[in-house]
């Protein structure tokens, strides 16, 4: 029975995969056309076959959930297991790696109806993005009131994508050397500083290659999408219900393109722009510009609460207060650890999530009054998290560098970002330094997929986006909506928090629940009023 079932599953998976949309990087080939070994077409065929083989094996094996590793510090209610995937899908019998998976089973009880029994709808798989973010803690979200109805119907499943955490982890440098600080963060860097950062980017790229070897080339978004299909099969799901946030929306969209018949429901929260011409160099330029606008939103909010923080009654005055703090930590690092780069990093978080606004404004206000403790606590490095942070940076770099061509001439980066920094100085150059190793990347590059589905190819999907999101500018949501036929876009107006699913906006959550629980979607586009702004918090006297 088991052998016969495995054979049938393998045949069905192979047939459906080979008749799906051609894999990215592999152009379609007419029947009877010659296929050269090692060509993109041949590699694409081999990878599709390898995915089907790996998924069939996973379906037969399943996941043996048990206690989670002690190091993850997860509560007993969460169970963990592993799923095996090929490092290289073109060689499914070659080197294998394990992805760590976490799960909380559906409660089966509706919290809004006297815990009335509700039918289980399968697994809801989540990826938090990054690249490099860990999803192992996702099942804990079922404890929040906003998620209890979803947790009643779905097993909540998180996992670490390849390279992350315990899933064949990547590393590019000694974690003990990861936190370099205090450090400068010039908004208009000198030529000497630029040369120093170019040298550091080259060294970092070499370190990634030296520590990972030939395996480095296999950490990219297409393989993340293929891994997702193997995970689907291992969970025993014929069709996948998936929620991706930020970068998770990109390889979720790749999955929808590669495996449309394997999709049940998909939520894309804070989507990135999937245009192949924008992955990833132009997407990062657009992000830097958007961060400037969101930085202005934060300064405007602080200025409207000048009676609380005393940082200035106009956004320009708040900017000058920030610059005073930046100059001061440049001259004497706060707590010996917080220089301009650490200060900028802390305030960058405020452009992702407006929940940070009161905390950052309070810390800045207190620091300028001679009390640095809060600023040091919020901006200083957490040494205990160095290994996790280094791993996250390594995965981010490897995936984005492997995914697409990048300019290899420093003069292109210098030209484009010098122009951009004239109007968007807040984050432009720090974004350059984060991505510059891709100019000197030693591994082969993928060709970005043309994310696209035609009418009827894919079940309706739900796209959620905040209008003023800086980390994933709103244009990306519009582009994702345009490319996924039958998708519905729900926009949170005049808001900028990065990721809006299951948060404080009841209108957004109603759309999310209606879709995931009942398959109901609004019209092609819908809008929700923005969430309330955070309340100011007065600094200590």
Image: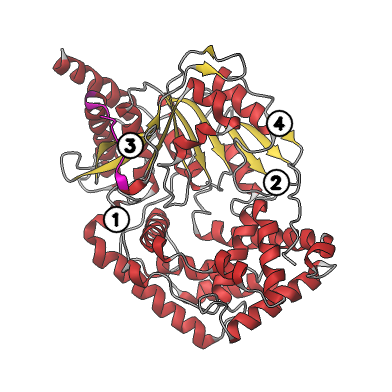
Find numbered disc 3 in the image and state the secondary structure of the residue it sits on: loop
Q: Indicate which disc, 4 or 2, sits on the residue closer to the N terminus.
A: 2
Q: Which residue is mark 4?
A: 507
Query: Residue 159: percent from the left, percent from the top?
Result: 38, 40
Contact between marks 2 and 3 (CB within 8 A): the answer is: no
Query: Alpha-carbon neighbours of circle 2 within 10 Å: few (<14), some, or many (≥20)?
Result: many
Label 3, residues with CA under 10 Å away: few <14, some 14-19, many ≥20: few
- Judging depth in this view, the residue of 212 and 46 nearest the camera is 212
Dot 4 crowding, Cα within 10 Å, few <14, some 14–19, many 20+:
some
Residue drawn at x 80%, y 73% as measured from the top left: 317
Q: Earlier in the sequence, mark 2 or mark 3?
A: 3
Mark 4 against mark 3, which lies toward the viewer?
4
Q: Can residue 28 be seen in the rendering of this structure?
A: no
Which callout, 4 or 1, points at the residue further toward the start of the chain? 1
Which x, y percent locates residue 281? Answer: 51, 60
Residue ID for mark 3: 29
Q: Nearer the viewer, mark 4 or mark 1?
A: 4
Secondary element under disc 2, as helix, strand or loop, is loop
Mark positioned earlier in the residue sequence (4 or 3): 3
Mark carried by residue 467: 2
- Reading the image, the residue beneath label 1 is 217
Q: Nearer the viewer, residue 459 or 314?
A: 314
């Amino acid at each position: 029975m088991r052998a016969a079932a495995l054979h049938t599953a393998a045949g069905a998976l192979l047939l459906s995969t080979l008749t799906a949309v051609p894999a990215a990087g592999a152009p379609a080939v007419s029947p009877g056309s010659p296929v050269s070994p090692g060509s993109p077409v041949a590699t694409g065929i081999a990878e599709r076959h390898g995915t089907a083989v790996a998924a069939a094996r996973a379906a037969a094996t399943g996941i043996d959930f048990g206690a989670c590793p002690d190091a993850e510090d997860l509560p007993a209610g969460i169970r963990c297991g592993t799923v095996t995937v090929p490092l290289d899908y073109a060689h499914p019998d070659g080197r294998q790696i394990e992805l760590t998976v976490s799960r909380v089973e559906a409660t089966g009880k509706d919290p809004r109806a006297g815990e009335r029994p509700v039918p289980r709808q399968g697994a809801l798989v989540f990826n938090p993005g990054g690249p490099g973010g860990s999803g192992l803690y996702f099942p804990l979200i079922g404890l929040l009131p906003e998620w209890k109805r979803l947790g009643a119907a779905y097993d909540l499943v998180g996992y670490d994508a390849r390279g992350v955490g315990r899933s064949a982890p990547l590393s590019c440098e000694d974690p003990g050397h990861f936190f370099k600080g205090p450090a400068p963060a010039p908004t208009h860097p000198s030529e000497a500083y630029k040369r120093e950062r170019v040298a550091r980017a080259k060294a970092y790229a070499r370190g990634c290659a030296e520590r990972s070897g030939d395996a480095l080339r296999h950490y990219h978004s297409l393989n993340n999408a293929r891994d997702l299909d193997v995970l689907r099969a291992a969970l025993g799901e014929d069709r996948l219900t998936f929620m991706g946030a930020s970068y998770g929306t990109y390889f979720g969209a790749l999955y929808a393109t590669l495996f449309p018949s394997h999709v049940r429901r998909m939520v894309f929260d804070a989507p990135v722009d999937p245009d192949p011409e924008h992955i990833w160099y132009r997407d990062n330029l657009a992000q830097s510009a958007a961060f400037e606008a969101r930085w202005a939103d934060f300064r405007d909010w602080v200025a409207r609460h000048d009676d609380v923080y005393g940082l200035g009654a106009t956004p320009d005055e708040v900017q000058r207060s920030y610059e005073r703090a930046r100059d001061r930590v440049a001259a004497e690092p706060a707590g010996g650890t917080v220089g301009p780069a650490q200060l900028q990093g802390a305030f960058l978080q405020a452009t992702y999530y407006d929940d940070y606004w009161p905390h950052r404004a309070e810390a800045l206000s207190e620091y300028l009054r001679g009390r640095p403790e809060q600023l040091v606590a919020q901006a200083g490095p957490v040494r205990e998290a160095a290994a996790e942070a280094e791993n996250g940076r390594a995965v981010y770099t490897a995936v984005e560098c492997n995914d697409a061509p990048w300019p290899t001439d420093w003069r292109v980066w210098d030209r484009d970002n010098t122009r951009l920094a004239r109007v968007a100085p807040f984050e432009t150059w720090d974004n350059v330094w984060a991505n510059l190793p891709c100019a000197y990347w030693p591994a082969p590059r993928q060709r970005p997929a043309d994310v696209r589905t035609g009418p009827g190819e894919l079940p309706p999907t739900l796209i959620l986006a905040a209008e003023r999101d800086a980390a994933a500018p709103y244009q990306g949501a519009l582009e994702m909506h345009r490319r996924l036929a039958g998708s519905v876009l729900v926009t949170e107006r005049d808001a900028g928090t990065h990721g809006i699913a299951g948060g404080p906006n009841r209108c957004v959550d109603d759309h999310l629940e209606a879709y995931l629980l009942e398959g109901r979607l609004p019209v092609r586009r819908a809008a929700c009023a923005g969430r309330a702004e955070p309340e100011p918090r007065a600094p200590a006297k």
